[in-house]
Image: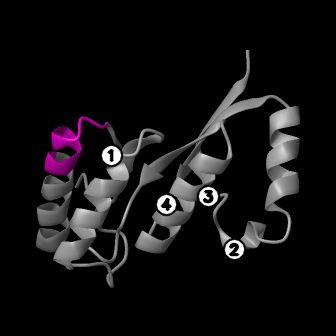
Amino acid sequence: MYIFDTHAHYEDEAFHEDREEILRLIRENGVGRVVNVGSSMKTTVQTAELTEKYDFIYGAAEHVMELEEESVYASLEQCLKKEKIVALGEIGLDYHYEDNPDREIQKKHFERQLGLAKSVKKPVLIHSRDAAR
């Protein structure tokens, strides 16, 4: 039996100086699998690189703030086709902050992302904050 970390951000710059050591230690201390979640185009690419370097790391692809660019969907689809990218997300609706994109824009992209996940046969990680009211 081992621990499965379902949501990590080891690509984050906070780990630049000691990433190798941290990943070695978590592996030695019972973490058998990790899903590292990208949160932008850049960090999704970094996540894919981590999945190639470490056999116990898998990835989830996400591009939150860049979705208005059509090219981002094409890049996201290509990333989702990689074997160790196991999900799309987090995707969803976040109505908590006033400066978040308009609700209709969020809904449009959420629906489109659900369609993308379905077309590449990948599950989604859903984020919902203050959107159920």
Q: Give the image location of residue 57, x and y in percent.
A: 62, 42
Residue type at mark 3 is His
**Which residue was labeled with disc 3?**
9
Where residue 13 is drawn, which disc sits there? 2
70 to the left or right of 16: left
The one of 34 and 84 positioned closer to us in this rendering: 84
- At 76% from the left and 66% from the top, the residue drawn is 15
Question: Of marks 1 and 4, which one's residue comes earlier in the chain?
Answer: 4
Disc number placed over residue 81 in the picture, else none: 1
Most common SS among magenta residues? helix
Can see residue 127?
A: no
- The disc labelled 2 sits on which kind of residue? Glu
Pointer 1 and pointer 4: residues touching (CB < 8 Å)? no
Rounded to the nearest whole Å, what is the CA distance between mark 3 and mark 2? 9 Å
Q: Which residues are magenta?
A: 115-122
Task: Locate residue 105, reporting x and y percent.
Answer: 15, 72
The residue carrying pointer 4 sits among few (fewer than 14), some (14 to 19) or many (20 or more) residues within 10 Å by Cα, namely many
Distance of label 4 from label 2 (alpha carbons): 12 Å
Q: Quadrant of residue 101?
A: bottom left
Residues tagged 4 and 2 counted as in contact (Cβ below 8 A):
no
Quadrant in which the C terminus is drawn = bottom left
Rendered image quadrant of residue 99: bottom left
Secondary structure category for the residue under label 4: loop
Cβ atoms at labels 3 and 4 below 8 Å apart: no
Which residue is the extreme one toward the bottom? 99
Query: Quarter of the image containing the N terminus?
Result: top right
